[in-house]
Image: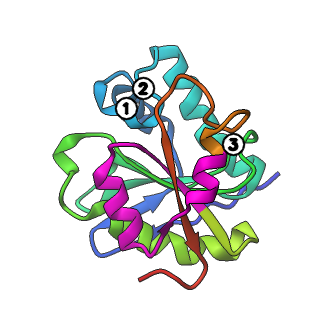
Amino acid sequence: MTVIIPTLETQRLILRAPQMRDSAAYVGFKRSERSKFTGGVASTQQARTNFSAIAGQWVLRGYGLFMAALKNDPDTAIGGFGIFHPERQEEPEFGWTLYDAAYEGKGYVTEAMRAIIPWAWDVIGVDTAQSHIDEGNAPSVAVATALGAKFDPVTTKKANGPGGEFDNDGPFVNIYRHTKGALT
């Protein structure tokens, strides 16, 4: 089996395949309070398993999350950006995570996703995708809207209602809908 994971570049970022050395940054993030909007703090073992699943989506789906690195430090992953589509999710999700607060407020997420979304439409085979944003995550709402996504109240209600994907003790999750051609 051959899996081809492209490398995309922006003005400041290299968006590349996950590598084992990226696991440390991801595990550090998942072991910290910063992970509150991505399922919360996980054990080291669970975080390692999650990282392997992120990399495995490329094999199973043909797409997944890119690891982003600054061009002046290509060996250090600053976050994961791209298409998150585990088996339990019916629709693909455009997702993003910065692993360290030092990288916040610099526009890296929007820059990365502006490169990834046009590429993504050609490989996911659908014309819409979701972004799942926990209630209270204003920075991610700002990114989603900057990328042309619109709040989807119908899907949000269904996903958080009885039997929905987020019908549990976790946070309320708002669904933002990306539509092919809407990237602003």
Using the rendered view, name the quadrant where residue 73 is placed.
bottom left
Numbered badge on residue 123: none
- SS category of the residue bearing label 1: helix
What's the amino acid at mark 3?
Pro
Mark 3 or 1 closer to N-term?
1
> Residue 20, how many percent across, how many down?
50, 35
Query: Which label lies toward us, 3 or 2?
Result: 2
Residue type at the position of mark 1: Ser
Which residue bears the numbered disc 3? 86
Instruction: Give the percent coordinates (x, y) of residue 127.
Output: 69, 75
Q: Is residue 51 left or right of residue 11?
A: right
Query: Which percent across, then down, holds residue 63?
Result: 66, 58
Q: Which residue position is annotated with label 2? A: 40
Q: Which residues are magenta?
A: 130-158
Q: CA distance from mark 3 to mark 1?
A: 18 Å
Residue sitting at the far right:
1
**Labels 2 and 1 touching (C-beta < 8 A):** yes
Determine whether label 3 and label 2 are within 8 Å by CB.
no
Residue drawn at x 45%, y 19% as measured from the top left: 42
Residue marked by disc 1: 35
Mark 3 to mark 2 CA distance (whole Å): 17 Å
- Residue at left offset 35%, top offset 63%: 143
Residue 182 falls within the magenta-colored stretch? no
Q: Residues within 10 Å of mark 3 (few under 14, many from 20)?
A: some
Viewer-side residue, 132 vs 163: 163
Q: Position of residue 147 (x, y in %)?
A: 42, 73
State which quadrant residue 181 falls in: bottom right
The first of marks 2 and 1 along the sequence is: 1
Residue type beneath disc 2: Gly
User: Secondary structure under badge 3?
Assistant: loop
Q: Callout 1: 10 Å neighbours few (<14), some, many (20+)?
A: some
